[in-house]
Amino acid sequence: MLALLAASPPARALDIQRPEVREFIDVTTRDFAIERASLEKLLSQAETKQSIVDAISKPAERVVPWYEYRERFLTDQRIQQGSEFWRTKGKQLAAVGDPALAATIAGIVGVETSYGRLTGRYRILDALATLAFDYPERGEFFRGQLQQFLLLAQEEAIDPTKALGSYAGAMGYAQFIPSSYRSFAVDGDDDGKRNLWTSWSDVIASVANYLRIHGWHDGEPVVVDARLEDSDLTRFDRSTLALNETVASLRAKGVAFETTLAPDAPALLIVLQGREGPLYRVGFNNFFVITRYNRSTMYANAVHDLGEAVRSTLPVAAAAPTRGDRG
């Protein structure tokens, strides 16, 4: 225990006399009309923590194959949690209109926070201050997020010294970063506040708003299983995450899959590592939209699969599939 304590440097108060902190205060008070004395007082209460830097900069863990990644989220327990979530929040989910969008929202909050159970233990103020001033690789980005958090705290009457979230400053059941919170969160329960920590109505409406603003198409499929005529992948451009194919072009290249979408509908080939070899899927526009939440095909597939697994536990009327969604 003594060795562990020695290996973890204690948190230290942010020194607001540091030149980079002074510059931040100057810019923020000038550009956002935040009162200087209040900002200095608040920042002096921030603590910089090595554990936050370690969490964001530690060497990447072994890249797990898809089948292991999927098993992290498609557990019986999490599916049961999701089923209970849908039963108790069915009215709010139905209000989004598109059953596939509702399932995707259920998948996102399940993957992100296990339906509100794991929302983060760091003070947002500490996380953002640490990364803004002691993580030079992305300091500019996090200084911007710290400014957004200060504005958010004013707008939503959030106590900036008490709000908790992830080590990267993501907040609430849906894990919005401050800029996303300010840009995409909505008041789903009409109480005059956008509360992503305790109001599921606000959370569900806000995730739906985020996805729609990023291009979600109601009534369209997300992703479907596929087969390839051979294992040669050189005919596909997999260098970037993009809708760089169409339904027709994939079929012309020997990809077999089912969809009611038009031949010119944008699509992408997804290659996943299964236990017994590669697995293939075709993602459509709505799949790509999910990757705007987290730029990872495995994340988007896990969100989709968890949402559909949860939906499959529900009565037929509550889980009616969207036209064309065979994924």
Image (cartoon, rainbow, N blue to C red):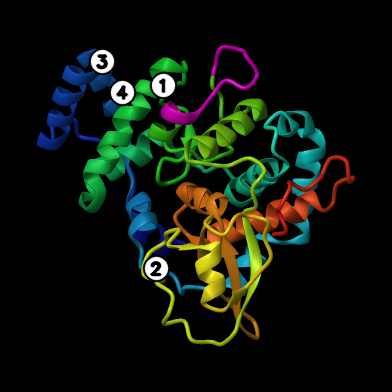
- Magenta region: which residues? 182-193
The secondary element bearing badge 3 is classed as loop
Q: Which is nearer the N-term, disc 1 or disc 4?
A: 4
Query: Badge 4 is on which residue?
Result: 42
What element does badge 2 sit on?
Answer: loop
Q: CA distance from mark 1 to mark 2?
A: 32 Å
Amino acid type, label 1 = Ala
Numbered mark located on residue 30 in the image: none
Please give the residue where the numbered disc 3 appears in the rendered image. 34
Q: Position of residue 195 (x, y in %)?
A: 56, 24
- In primary-sequence order, the first of circles 2 and 3 is 3
Work out which quarter of the rendered image holds the C terminus and state it.
Answer: bottom right
Relative to 2, is 148 above or below?
above
* Residue shown at 57% from the left, 36% from the top: 207
Membership of 191 in magenta stretch: yes
Q: Earlier in the sequence, mark 4 or mark 2?
A: 4
